[in-house]
Image: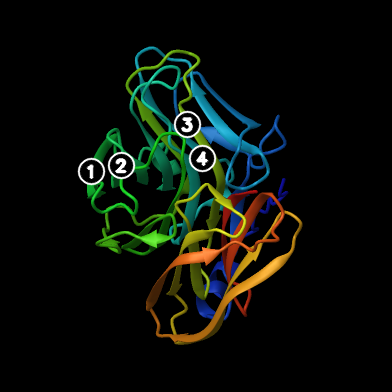
Amino acid sequence: MRNTRRLATLTTILALALMLAPAALATELSRETGGNGVVTDLPWTTTSFLTQTLSAQARNAPSGDGRALRLAIDLSVGGVSTTLVDDPLNETADGRFAADIHVLPATAPFGPPARRGIVFRANPATMFGDAYQFVFDFDGTLVFRAFVGGAGMTLRRWDATEMPGGLAQPFSWHRLEAIALGDSFRLLYDGRELPSSPVLDSTLMSSGRSGFYTFHFSADSAAEIGIFDDFVAEDLGNVILSVGTPLDYVRRGDAAQIAAFAFNASGEDATRTFRLVFVDRGGIETVIAERTLTLRDGQRVAKELPSVRVPVGAHVGPGRFRFESDLGESAEVFVEVTP
C-alpha cells in the first residue's frame, strides 16, 4: 500500500506566506488510502449520533493497495453520517478535495438508495451542521449542495445526459473532486469538469473540515453504507491538476480514455511543461505525452485523450496514469492492468 499520511502543520505565518508567494506549490493536508486493514491512515471523527463503524477492509480499490474504507451504520430507520478528518490543522476554506466513491446497488445486502460523496467546509462551530456536499444522489445523479442548519439546498444537479458515460453503474468506482476558491467551485467527475462549472455560491465562506458524507433512509446492520478510497485534501498552489478515467480495468496494449485538467490559481501567468506518464506495478514509467503551455491567471485547460494505450509490456496488477508538471504539481488515477 502507499503509506502517505501527511498532515501539514499550517500556522498563521505559513498561511500568509502561501498567499503572498505565488510560487508555492500545493500543500497536501491529508491523504487516506485505507490504512493497513485494521486502522486507518488518518484520524476520523463522526458527527452522527448513530452507531457507526469505520474500518479499512480488503477491496479491489483504485489506489492499488487492495484496501478501502468501509462505513457501516447499524440502524433501522435511516439517517445522516458525516465522517471528517479529525484534525483542526486540516481546516481550510480554499482547497482541492477529492475521493474515489464505490457505487453500490440499492438492493440487499447493500441497503436502500443512498447519498454518498465528499464534504468540505464543514464548520465545527455549528457541530459540522453547515457544509458543502458533492455527492451521488438517490437516483444516481450528481448533486452539489449547501447544507445549512440541517437543511440541504441544491446548487446544481447533473443527470445522465450531463455525466460523462451516463449514470454510474453498480460496483464501479468514480472520483469526485471539488476545487474551492472563495465563492467559486469547480466540480470534476473522473477528471472531467462538469457542465456549468464553476458553480458560484457564497453561502458558506468560512474554513472547515473535510471528509465523507452518507445518507440513507433505512438499512439493516450488515448494510454496506459507504465505500471510499484515496481521499485527499490539499491547499491551493500555483497550478491545480486533475486526471481521470471511467475505467476500472484495462488490458495491456489496449486504449484507455483519459481526461486531463489544469487550472491556474497562482495569481499570475504560469508556464509549465505538462507530462502524462503511465506507471506500472513494477514502477516502470512510460511518458505518453508532453507539452509546454502558458496559462493565464484563472485559465483552465481540459483535454480529452480517448485512446491512450497502456504499454504492452506493462506489469499485470495496479497501475496509474500520472499527470504532472515540471515544477512538481501532479495528480494521478489508478487502473487495474489485466493480461
Disc 2 marks a residue whose amino acid type is Phe
Disc 3 marks a residue whose amino acid type is Gly
Crowding around mark 1 (Cα neighbors within 10 Å: few <14, some 14 to 19, many 20+) is some
Q: Residue at x 26, y 54 (%)?
A: 162
- Discs 3/1, front: 3
Q: Secondary structure at mark 3?
A: strand
- Which mark sits nearer the N-terminus, 4 or 3? 4
Q: Which residue is mark 4?
A: 84
Q: Residue at x 50, y 68 (%)?
A: 241
Observer-nearest of 110 and 149: 110
Q: Which residue is mark 2?
A: 147
Q: CA distance from mark 1 to mark 2?
A: 6 Å
Q: Secondary structure at mark 2?
A: strand
The reply to whether the C-beta atoms of the residues labelled 4 and 3 are less than 8 Å apart is no
- Could you say which disc has been placed on residue 153 in the image? 1
- Could you say which disc has been placed on residue 30 in the image? none
Q: Which residue is mark 3?
A: 226
Disc 1 marks a residue whose amino acid type is Met
Residue 189 vertical placement versus 293 (above, below): above
Crowding around mark 2 (Cα neighbors within 10 Å: few <14, some 14 to 19, many 20+) is many
- Discs 2/3, front: 3
- Which mark sits nearer the N-terminus, 4 or 2? 4
Q: Residue 11, position in %: x, y?
A: 61, 62
Residue 253 vertical placement versus 208 (above, below): below
The reply to whether the C-beta atoms of the residues labelled 4 and 1 are less than 8 Å apart is no
Residue 155 vertical placement versus 303 (above, below): above
Q: Residue 127, position in %: x, y?
A: 42, 36
Q: Secondary structure at mark 4?
A: strand
